[in-house]
Structures are given as C-alpha cells and as structure tokens.
Image (cartoon, rainbow, N blue to C red):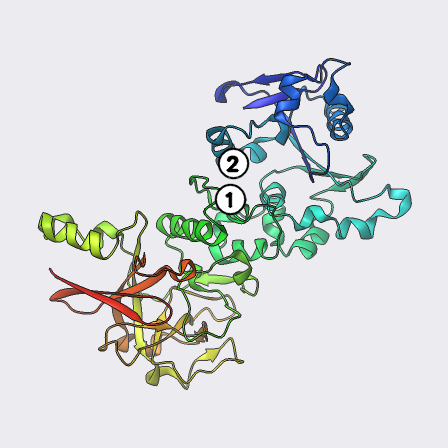
Amino acid sequence: MRLLNTKSLELQHFVPNQVPDYVILSHRWASEELTFEDITKYPVSNPNSPARRKQGFSKVQGACKLAARDGYGWIWIDSCIDKSSSSELQETINSMWNYYEQSNIFYVYMADVPDSEAGWDRRFQKSEWFTRGWTLQELIAPAYVEFYTGNWSPIGTKLERHKEIANITKIDLDVLVQAESIDNFSAAERFSWAAHRQVTREEDETYSLLGLFHVDMPMLYGEGGKKAFTRLQEAIYNSMLDQTLFLFSYSSHRESQPLLADCPTRFCQIARCASCETRCFPSHVSYSDVFPTSNWSVQAHEQIMTTVTPFRNEISATISLIDDRDVSNRLMFLNDDESRTEISHVAILNHTLIDHIEGALCLLLFQPPDSEGVAFHRTRSFLALLPCVKEFTSRLQKQRILICPDPSSSDRNQRIDITFALDDDQFLAWSWSARCVNHRSAVPV
C-alpha cells in the first residue's frame, strides 16, 4: 500500500503489517488531476515540481493540511495507484473496501458544493458525489466520514447527517451508521443501492461493487458491462447462495428473460427481503454435490462437463416447483401491468418480504410447447408472493437447477440459461436462449 506523507508530500510504500494510521481523500475527478505518474516523475515534495501547477494539486494539498491538522502523517488518494499496471490495479480494486474500512478518517471533498455562506445545504443533497458508482462503498465501508465543501468548509459527518444521506442514497440507515452488518442484507438489496449510479467505464459498474460482497474477481476491461455483472452474480451465488439474485425486474416485454440480471438498475424496486423459516425448502447443494465424481465414470463426467457446462463458471442449487393451477388464486402479483396467461409453474424461492414472513417470493415459469415437459422459461411477470407456503408443502416438487452459459447462443445478452433435473434415473440437461430450446443432452447416472 502506498501512502503520501502529509507534510513532506513524499510517496512511500508499506507492507501490509506495517501500515501506519492514515486518512483517505475521496473526490470527483476533474481536469488536470494528479496521477501516479505525476507524483513519481515530478515529486510534489519539490516546490518547483511541474505537478504543483496542475489544478488537482490544490485539492491534494488541502487534504494533506487537513490531515496534518488532525494529527495524521499519512494519506491515501487514488493518485497512489499505478494504473498503468493491470496487476496493481486489480489488487487495489479488490482491496479498496479494506482500505476504506481501516482508515482513521475518510474525507469527502465536494467541489460542486459552495461555501456554507452561499447556502450549501441544498447543493449537498444534489452533489454528483452521491451519484457515482465508486462512492457507494466509500460511503458504507469507513466508520468515520467527514464532508467538506469546495472551499474546505466542514459540512458535517456521516453520523451527523445519516438520515439525510439515507434519504439521498436509499441506503439502509443501520448500514450507514454501522449499527447492522452489511452481511445481513441480501444481494438484491445491496444491488438496489447501486441502481442508477454512474461510472465512466461500463465494467466499473460491476467492479465498484466487489467490496460490498467481499468478492475478489479478475478485472477484464473490454469484456463489457453485462458480462462483468454476470460474473459478479455467479461469484456471489457461489459464495452466498443468495436466491434474491433472481428477484429483479426487466422493463422489456419479451416472451422470456434471462435468469440473472444484466445490470444493478434491474434491482431498483426491490423491497426488504428476509429468509424464509419454512422447513419445506430443500437445502442448497454445490456443483460437486450435484455431480459427485465418485458416481460418474471419467468419460461420463467429462461428457457432461463438456456438453452442459463448457465454461469456467457454473451455479447449482435445489429449488421447489409447484403447478400454477394449485396456487393461481393465492398468488400476490407484484407486477400487475404484465400478462400472466403464460404461467404454468411457480418456483418457490427461499426468501420472502419482511411484511409477509409466512410467505415466499416466487419466480413465474412456463413450459414451451416443444419442451417435452422438461424445460421451463421465466416469464415477463418475474415476481409474485405466495402468502402462506405451509398450506402447499405437500405439493412441492424438489427440482435440481443449474445455471450455465449457453455456448450455442450468439447473443451475449442471452448467455444465461436454466436447467432442471426431473428424472431419478437419468440427468436431463436442457439449455436454451431467450427465444427457444436449442439442444438436449442426456447422460445416465
């Protein structure tokens, strides 16, 4: 970790177990910002350094003076990162949550908020800082945050203004003041806090969220925002087994939708969820549990790995299905604008809304005419609530579900499929794009 000395303005590297107390500066990038190259090529410790003539230097200098006044000798700013090194950039992005969490003070510099005498209160609420993707974890991770105007006048702390900030950002109040761990909130809720935030590079919409889920993953700039977000959801599901990843809304009116969302904005309407306590739900299973190598010959195992999950990431779990006719008069539809005529089955998830603790959230599915009774598509009406699950426990069918990329689909948006295992004697693996079923592979157990 590199830190800038607040008095000498010299950059120094520290190994993990020798990092001194430090503060952090958060700000919105503008023109002529100081970069790592500027600081190393033209050290700002030199009064005659050309880097001092850049507009961004005054911001760094102001933060250093503030830190020194508060008794801290070291400060971290994003100019401490060598962004020309992909390995360092990846390591830093994966470590940012820890950097923020371990900082003694987190300064937020709001250049677009004028001095208090000019009436900064309304401008504080409208500051662009609250709209950026990277600032979400910057707001949540550190315990102590101080806000400053463009003239370095104090606005207040996160704790002092927590109700106002919660109203601005829609982040749960208890998360802001760290009265409750972020780990107690579902993936869907955390994604909802990121909805509508802006980034410069589309992949950063995903990479800026890694700290919220304590997930490490490679930075692949150029892969596109949708693919990056899919990788993140796969990593989250594999580590958290959180079925709220399926609780999102698509605005388009297609006949069926991918099982995973393509961006955080899809979760903007999510309500507070809670885990169901109903014991009828089957436990989650891992990929290795679904296909234990001891039950497969080498050839058969290689075949299913090749034909069904040819890509690196795959997700598996167990899910409960029930015929729509059994519950159609009981379902509470949470998206009344869309047709429900296609629904044939309901997938019972292991989460409910906090106001309906005896119920369960459901995915609405239908069987295409050519599916031979095996495959299910997700309908446009993505979400419903079954108010009382216990009444239907005896009719629930436990189904094995596998989410994997579809190698036959040329449309990047439709690379996430759903596969059900319905037969005790053989594993029937179906995969399809959003348009139709496209292939079948049956491997005997």
Q: Is residue 380 left or right of residue 41?
A: left
Q: Nearer the viewer, residue 394 or 255?
A: 255
Q: Helix, strand, or loop for circle 2? A: helix
Q: Residue furthest right?
A: 117
Direction left: furthest residue: 297
Residue 280 appears in the picture as rendered: no
Residue at the spot x=28%, y=81% of the render?
Answer: 369
Amino acid at circle 1: Tyr
Q: Residues within 10 Å of mark 1 (few under 14, many from 20)?
A: many
Residue shown at the point (20%, 69%) measured from the top left: 422
Residue 23 location, x and y as percent? 65, 28
Q: Which mark is residue 207?
A: 1
Mark 1 vs 2: CB contact within 8 A: yes
Is 295 on the left-hand or right-hand side of 251?
left
Find residue 93 and name its label: 2
Three-letter code, disc 2: Ile
User: Residue 151 location, x and y as percent?
Assistant: 83, 35
Q: Secondary structure at mark 1?
A: helix
Q: Earlier in the sequence, mark 1 or mark 2?
A: 2
In which quadrant will I find the N terminus? top right
Q: Quadrant of residue 255?
A: bottom left
